C-alpha cells in the first residue's frame, strides 16, 4: 500500500486495508478511511485512571504529534530523547519541519499546559516495518518516562491495550483528540499482530502494550475492513520482534541499553536555618525535593529565587492536610523593602502558585503551618 499523504482530502477509493494515519479532525475536513472502531466504541480517557494505575504510568510516554499542514499522528518515547511513530506519518526529514509534539494532551488540560517538547532531528525510518525515529531536545524521557520494548510473540487471546490520541470524530466532528486507552485482545498473529482494540485515523504510531507486562509488543499502523464508516473488523501493528533487531542493526546507540547513562542531577540539601530573608534557601531553575517539614509551631521555611521580567514563578508544596495544614506567602523585593504579593492557602492537600513577574528582582516564598500546624512536605519549583 502506498504511503499515506499528510492532510489527505478527497479520498475517492476505499480499500479493505487502510492506514490509520495522519488526519485533520476539523469541522470541514475529509478524513482518511481508517475504519477501525470494532463494534461499539470501547475506549476511555487516560485521566479516568488513577495516577498510580500502570496503564496511566505507561501512557505518560505517549505523545500527540501535530504536523505543520494540520495532520496528526500518535508517537511514544522509546528512550530518553527518541520518539517513535509510523513511517507513513514521518516519511522524511521534511515532515518534521514545523512539527509539534505534546506530552500531556489529555482531557481537561488546557493547550498552554499540554507540555510541548521539541523533536526536530530526523534519525531514519523503514517503510516495510512502518516505523520512523526522531530525536528530541534534552531528555524528556527522564520526565515522562519511556516505554520498554518487548521482543515477544503474543498468543491469540492475549489481553492488550493501545494508548493513543483520538476521539470519535465520525460522531462528533469537532471533538478533542485527547489521550485515550483502548483495551482489547489479540485475534490473530502473522506478519502483523491483529487485535480488536479501537482506534481511528490519528492513532497511527501508537504503542500496543501487553496488559500483563505493560511492555510494548507492536506499533499500531493499520485498520482493516468496514467501509467508509469509521468502523471495521480489526486493527494491526508491526511487532517489536521485527523492529527492535532492525533498530539495533541500522541505528546503533538509539535504545537505552546502548546509550550512556545520564549524569544524575544532585538533589539540593537545604539548611534547617532558613527561617529569615537573610538565610533563605536559594532555588535555581528547577528543583524537586522530598522530605522537608515544618517541624514546630514557630518553624517557617524561607526560599529565595532571582526572577527576570516575564518569567513565570511556579512553586508547589505537596503535603497531607490530615497531618497538618501548610500555606505559603510570596514576597517581592523592592528598592524600599520586601512586600507581600500573594498568599496561597486552602483547606485541602497541597498548595501551588504560577506567577508571571513584571520586573527583574528577587522573590521570597515563606512556607508555614496554619495556626501552628506541623507537617512534612515535598517542594517543586521551576521558572520559565
Image (cartoon, rainbow, N blue to C red):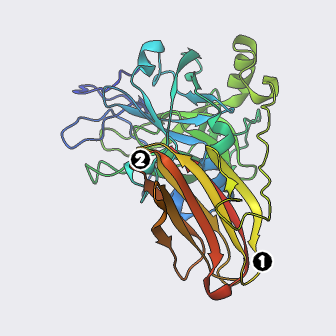
Q: Quadrant of residue 215?
A: top right
Q: Residue 24 placed where, x, y %?
A: 30, 35
* Secondary structure category for the residue under label 2: loop
Q: Is residue 25 left or right of residue 236?
A: left
Name the residue furthest left: 28
Q: Quadrant of the N terminus?
A: top left
Q: Nearer the viewer, residue 272 or 209?
A: 272
Provide residue 20's location: percent of width, then percent of height: 43, 34
In terms of sequence position, does the residue under pointer 2 or pointer 1 come before the other?
A: 1
Residue with the mark numbered 2: 359
Residue 187 appears in the figure: no
User: Residue sitting at 42 percent across and 27 percent down?
Assistant: 99
> Where's residue 127, x and y in %?
54, 16
Label 1 Cα neighbours within 10 Å, binned few <14 / some 14-19 / many ≥20: some
Number of residues whose C-alpha sits closer than 10 Å to that of mark 2, classed few (under 14), some (14–19) or many (20 or more): few
Q: Residue at x 76, y 29 (%)?
A: 256
Relative vertical location of residue 218 with respect to residue 280 in this rendering, above or below: above
Q: Is residue 49 left or right of residue 373?
A: left
As drawn, is 315 to the left or to the right of 89? right
- Dot 1 corresponds to which residue? 295
Up the image or down, 297 lies above or below 238; here it is: below
Q: Compared to 38, does 70 lie above or below?
A: above
Q: Residue pushed farthest bottom?
A: 371
Q: Secondary structure at mark 1?
A: loop
Residue 374, image x and y in percent?
72, 81
Residue 349 circle label: none
Asked if the residue under mark 1 is in contact with the one under mark 2, i.e. CB atoms within 8 Å, the reply is no
Residue 39 appears left or right of 195: left
Foreground tag (2 vs 1): 2
Amino acid at each position: 500500500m502506498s504511503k499515506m499523504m499528510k492532510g489527505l482530502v478527497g479520498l475517492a477509493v476505499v480499500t479493505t486495508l487502510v492506514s490509520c494515519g495522519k488526519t485533520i479532525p476539523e469541522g470541514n475536513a475529509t478524513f482518511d478511511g481508517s475504519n477501525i472502531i470494532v463494534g461499539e466504541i470501547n475506549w476511555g480517557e487516560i485521566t479516568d485512571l488513577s495516577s498510580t494505575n500502570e496503564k496511566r504510568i505507561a501512557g505518560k510516554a505517549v505523545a500527540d504529534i501535530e504536523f505543520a499542514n494540520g495532520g496528526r499522528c500518535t508517537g511514544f518515547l522509546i528512550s530518553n530523547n527518541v520518539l517513535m511513530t509510523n513511517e507513513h506519518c514521518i516519511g522524511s526529514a521534511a515532515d518534521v519541519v514545523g512539527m509539534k509534539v505534546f506530552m500531556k494532551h489529555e482531557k481537561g488540560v488546557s493547550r498552554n499546559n499540554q507540555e510541548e517538547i521539541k523533536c526536530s532531528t530526523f534519525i531514519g525510518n523503514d517503510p516495510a516495518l512502518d516505523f520512523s525515529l526522531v530525536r528530541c531536545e534534552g531528555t524528556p524521557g527522564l520526565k515522562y518516562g519511556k516505554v520498554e520494548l518487548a521482543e515477544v510473540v503474543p498468543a491469540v487471546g492475549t489481553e492488550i491495550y493501545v494508548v493513543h490520541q483520538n476521539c470519535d470524530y465520525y460522531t462528533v466532528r469537532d471533538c478533542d483528540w485527547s489521550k485515550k486507552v483502548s483495551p482489547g485482545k489479540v485475534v490473530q498473529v502473522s506478519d502483523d499482530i491483529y487485535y480488536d482494540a479501537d482506534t481511528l485515523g490519528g492513532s497511527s504510531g501508537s504503542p500496543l502494550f501487553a496488559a500483563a507486562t505493560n511492555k510494548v509488543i507492536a506499533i499500531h499502523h493499520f485498520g482493516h475492513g468496514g467501509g467508509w464508516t469509521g468502523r471495521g473488523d480489526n486493527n494491526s501493528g508491526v511487532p517489536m520482534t521485527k523492529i527492535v533487531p532492525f533498530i539495533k542493526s541500522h541505528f546503533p546507540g538509539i535504545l537505552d541499553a546502548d546509550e550512556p547513562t545520564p549524569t544524575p542531577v544532585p538533589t539540593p540539601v537545604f539548611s534547617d536555618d532558613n527561617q529569615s530573608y537573610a538565610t533563605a534557601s536559594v532555588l535555581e531553575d528547577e528543583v524537586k525535593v522530598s522530605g522537608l517539614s515544618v517541624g514546630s509551631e514557630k518553624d517557617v521555611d524561607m526560599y529565595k529565587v532571582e526572577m527576570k521580567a516575564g518569567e513565570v514563578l511556579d512553586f508547589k508544596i505537596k503535603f497531607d492536610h490530615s497531618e497538618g495544614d501548610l500555606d505559603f506567602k510570596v514576597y517581592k523585593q523592592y528598592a524600599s523593602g520586601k512586600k507581600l504579593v500573594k498568599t496561597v492557602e486552602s483547606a485541602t492537600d497541597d498548595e501551588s502558585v504560577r506567577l508571571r513577574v513584571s520586573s527583574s528582582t528577587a522573590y521570597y516564598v515563606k512556607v508555614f503551618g496554619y495556626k501552628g500546624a506541623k507537617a512534612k512536605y515535598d517542594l517543586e519549583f521551576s521558572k520559565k
